[in-house]
Amino acid sequence: MIKVNLSGAAKQKTAKAGVKISMPATATPILLIAIVLGFAGGGYWWYSSLAGQLADLTQRIQQGEAQIAKLETVIKLDSIFESRKAMLEKRVKLIEELQRNQISPVVALDKLSEAVDNTEFVWLNSLEQNNAVFSIAGVGTSYEAVGAFQANLRETGYFTNFDLPRVAQAGANNFTFSIRCEFVPPRAAAPAAQPAPPGGK
């Protein structure tokens, strides 16, 4: 009978299969340090990128605020200019009104008398003045006389903006009337430009 010892072969095979590769003890810390340094470098790059973007945004915001400040200054100056312009226009208008009122009583009565003298069969009863507006009341012998008086007022060149006259018959040959108009003295003509001397000098 032949006997084979199988247990010894199995032990040798198992021993061969259980061979392990061992690493140096210093390799693991170096690998960990490399990983940590890699993460640190990536974090620093990411932080630097964010810091650069933040600085760029901050600069743009400052530029925008500077432009807004300039625009606000321009708008404020324009508003001041417009308000001063309006004040000057009101002042000029007031001065013109005062000048007109200063000459109105004398000149108005003179021109009114001129219109009455040029109209037959018309007499005045009252005259009221409110700034530049005149209310004239009187009596005429006919509608035609009242119409002629208004036309003569207009022809003086000092009375304008006539309202429709009110005329009512007060008797056989008497017609009361009231005329409302504005007294506007004509503006003085601007001096004519002097002709240029011969030769263009």
Image: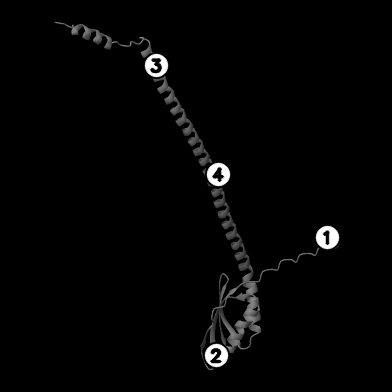
Q: Residue furthest bottom?
A: 172
Q: Earlier in the sequence, mark 2 or mark 1?
A: 2
Label 2 environment density (alpha carbons within 10 Å; few <14, some 14–19, many ≥20): some
For disc 2, the marked residue is 174
Q: Nearer the viewer, mark 3 or mark 2?
A: 3
Q: Amino acid at mark 4?
A: Lys
At which x and y percent is residue 95? 61, 62
**Spatial CA span between label 2 and label 1:** 68 Å
Label 2 sits on a secondary structure element that is loop
Q: Earlier in the sequence, mark 1 or mark 4?
A: 4
Mark identifier at residue 33: 3
Label 4 sits on a secondary structure element that is helix
- In the picture, measured across the screen, residue 101 lies left or right of residue 15, that is right
At which x and y percent is residue 191? 74, 66
**Spatial CA span between label 4 and label 3:** 55 Å
Asked if 44 appears above or below 166 in the picture, the reply is: above
Q: Are marks 1 and 4 in contact (CB under 8 Å)?
A: no
Mark identifier at residue 200: 1
> Between residues 70 and 169, which one lies in front from this camera angle?
70
